[in-house]
Image (spheres, grey):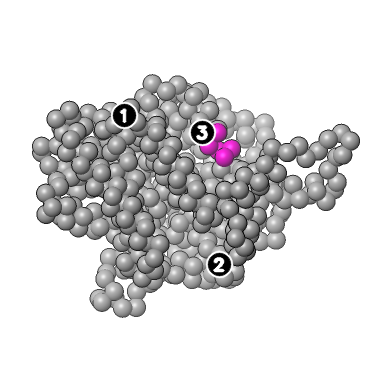
């Protein structure tokens, strides 16, 4: 499949470059995105394609979404591309490729078959006890987190709540006959919870990680494409109605979020809007086009990156690593050693400073790694930083599985905990590094705590295979 995807991507590059007359870097970026997509789909069900997923999300949000916006033109007063396409793509495309090289320079064994083989018949009972323990901790933490807003404790509870999904990941393999029931029930509850808050990021990430674990190995490529197409269309529907949905549920009126969501979906997609007798007027047609453009604006992280390219260094000097150093200090040093270290709102402060844009009170946006690295180190320095970041992620996976997991393949399931925030392409370095470091510390404390209670996560008695 790699050879096929490579040949297809090369043909697509020449199609974009010679026939569509796209600029070189746009053609290269789109062809590279196609290659990653095919590679990702082909590995579903065979491996836990975490690295491919990270690159795919970045490619979609930084390259594909940006290209669509360049094709649309300036369709919004703020969410548009601030620099020319050649300026943008000549930095972003090599940056994504550099990150990919860093990610794959070290090989990580993330085979799904190895996870299955780790659940031997004799160890299933002890693993089932571990799974139920993790689910209970996750549920208790999720409930507690609704009532506790103390910064440090709230983050610990947030990490603990992710254990629910790790525990369910265990159950997929321990109780394979019930995995689809567990899959749909968990996602259904998560979806309803997301409707209540108006926030859907967590649900989409959980769904993605779960699909990595439950997709059968013998699933055909076309079937996987169909599932991904359905998921993509669902995400598109979310983006179209999300703005209006949030306005309704945040209005203070007592409404049923499920009914509101269904009504909006029905109005936008299930009711015919135009007939030959009653064509859409110019105003309605413009509103429909604006909704389509707005959906891409939510997909496209490129407008923020382009704003940084526009603003730095013309209006704001390069930061020379300041925000990266702040992130490392905030993640590694406890508050009593660094009382002035960056807090939870630092990412928003950095966004306003580096982009020069103001945000409404409730708005929350991230620079993205590639924009933050540029703002600190410039073009070449940004490429180097992207490569080192990819290498950091690959080394982290190796450390997590070989050291924390004692060479157990079961640790692949735990990647849900460590990389829940890391996979997001719109996240700042401080959020990514903070989550990665603190989740590792959290796991180490959890592992010791459970062992004191007689629960061994990766003991020799419940571990069949080891990594080579």
The tag earlier along the polypeptide, 1 or 3, is 1
Task: Tell me which secondary structure the magenta stretch mostly adopts.
Answer: helix
Numbered disc in front, either 1 or 2: 1
Query: Which residues lie in the magenta part?
Result: 230-234
The crowd level at tag 1 (other Cα within 10 Å; few <14, some 14-19, many 20+) is some
Whether 88 is among the magenta residues is: no
Measure the C-alpha gap from mark 1 to mark 2. 43 Å
Q: Is residue 309 above or below residue 70?
A: below
Residue 52 appears anywhere in the view:
no
The structure residue drawn at horizontal position 67% and vertical position 34%, both measured from the top left corner, is: 20
Numbered label attached to residue 381: none
Measure the C-alpha gap from mark 2 to mark 3. 32 Å
The structure residue drawn at horizontal position 32% and vertical position 57%, both measured from the top left corner, is: 141
Residue marked by disc 1: 176
Residue marked by disc 2: 362
Q: Position of residue 385 (x, y in %)?
A: 39, 55
């Amino acid at each position: 499949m790699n050879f096929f995807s490579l040949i297809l991507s090369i043909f697509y590059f020449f199609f974009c470059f010679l026939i569509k007359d796209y600029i070189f870097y746009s053609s290269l970026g789109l062809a590279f995105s196609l290659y990653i997509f095919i590679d990702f789909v082909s590995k579903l069900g065979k491996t836990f394609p975490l690295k491919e997923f990270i690159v795919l999300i970045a490619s979609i949000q930084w390259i594909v979404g940006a290209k669509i916006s360049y094709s649309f033109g300036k369709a919004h007063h703020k969410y548009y591309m601030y620099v020319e396409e050649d300026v943008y793509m000549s930095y972003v495309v090599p940056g994504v490729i550099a990150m990919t090289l860093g990610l794959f320079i070290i090989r990580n064994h993330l085979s799904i078959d190895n996870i299955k083989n780790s659940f031997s018949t004799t160890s299933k009972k002890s693993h089932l006890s571990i799974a139920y323990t993790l689910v209970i901790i996750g549920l208790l933490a999720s409930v507690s987190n609704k009532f506790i807003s103390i910064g440090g404790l709230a983050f610990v509870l947030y990490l603990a709540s992710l254990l629910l999904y790790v525990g369910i990941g265990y159950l997929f393999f321990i109780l394979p006959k019930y995995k689809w029931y567990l899959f749909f029930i968990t996602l259904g509850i998560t979806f309803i919870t997301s409707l209540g808050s108006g926030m859907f990021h967590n649900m989409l990430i959980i769904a993605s990680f779960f699909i990595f674990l439950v997709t059968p190995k013998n699933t055909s490529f076309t079937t996987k494409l169909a599932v991904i197409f359905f998921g993509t269309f669902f995400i598109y529907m979310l983006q179209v109605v999300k703005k209006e949905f949030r306005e309704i549920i945040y209005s203070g009126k007592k409404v049923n979020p499920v009914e509101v969501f269904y009504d909006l979906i029905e109005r936008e997609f299930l009711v015919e809007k135009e007939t030959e007798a009653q064509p859409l007027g110019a105003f309605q047609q413009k509103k429909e086009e604006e909704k389509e453009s707005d959906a891409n604006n939510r997909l496209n992280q490129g407008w923020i990156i382009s704003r940084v390219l526009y603003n730095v260094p013309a209006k704001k000097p390069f930061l020379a690593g300041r925000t990266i150093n702040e992130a490392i200090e905030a993640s590694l040093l406890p508050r009593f050693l660094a009382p002035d270290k960056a807090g939870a709102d630092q990412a928003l402060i950095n966004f306003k400073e580096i982009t020069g844009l103001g945000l409404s009170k409730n708005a929350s946006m991230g620079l993205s790694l590639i924009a933050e690295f540029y703002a600190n180190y410039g073009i070449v320095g940004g490429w180097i930083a992207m490569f080192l970041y990819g290498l950091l992620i690959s080394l982290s996976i190796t450390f997590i599985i070989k050291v924390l997991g004692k060479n157990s393949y079961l640790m692949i399931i735990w990647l849900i905990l460590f990389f829940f925030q890391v996979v997001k392409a719109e996240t700042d370095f401080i959020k990514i590094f903070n989550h990665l470091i603190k989740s590792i510390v959290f796991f180490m404390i959890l592992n010791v705590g459970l062992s004191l209670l007689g629960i061994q996560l990766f003991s020799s008695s419940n571990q069949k295979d080891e990594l080579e």
